[in-house]
Image: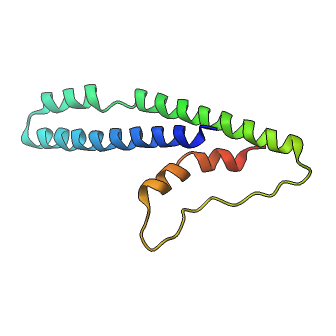
Amino acid sequence: MGLGKIMTEYSGKASKTGKARNKLHALEKKHREAGHTSKADRIKTNNLGTKKINARKNKAQERIRNIAFKAAHSVVDKASLVISEDLSRPIAKKKPRKKYNRKMFSMGQRHTSRSP
């Protein structure tokens, strides 16, 4: 319960953050090329760090891992035979479903496939 909500929430935040970072990176590059190195250095120092992004990613991965492992253990404890599906590749369609594939396969596939 709640796996989809966590994955959707993290995926949306990561996408939004990545888009904003790309814009700031382009702005930093533009200032550096124009010779405004001090402004470019301030943008890089104050806005393009990865500590918070990595912390958010690790927290979401741990939450997903815990949910996947709890679900796997609850099934394995009661079942005599367990069959799983390979979810290692994105769903192939005529139109690529970028958001869906990003949500489903970014972190969740890694943890659900490794659940003991």
Colouring used for the render? rainbow
Q: Quadrant of the N terminus?
A: top right
Query: For the point 40% across and 38% down, which residue is it?
Result: 13
Q: Is residue 40 left or right of residue 50?
A: left
Query: For the point 65% across and 44% down, which residue is it?
Result: 111
Q: Position of residue 73 (x, y in %)?
A: 80, 39
Is 43 located above or below residue 16 in the figure? above
Q: Quadrant of the C terminus?
A: top right
Q: Is residue 20 left or right of residue 97?
A: left
**Residue in the foreground of this view, choosing between 43 and 59:** 59
Q: Residue furthest bottom?
A: 94
Q: Position of residue 70 (x, y in %)?
A: 74, 36
Number of marks drawn:
0
Q: Residue 107 sits in which quadrant? A: top right
**Residue in the foreground of this view, choosing between 34 and 80:** 80
Is 115 located above or below residue 95 in the figure? above
Q: Is residue 41 left or right of residue 34?
A: right
Q: Position of residue 87 (x, y in %)?
A: 64, 59
Is 100 located above or below residue 5 in the figure? below
Q: Position of residue 63 (x, y in %)?
A: 60, 32
Q: Residue furthest front?
A: 1
Q: Residue 53 sits in which quadrant? A: top left
Query: For the point 48% across and 43% down, which residue is it?
Result: 8
Q: Is residue 62 left or right of residue 10?
A: right
Query: For the point 30% across and 44% down, which residue is it?
Result: 19
Q: Residue furthest right?
A: 80
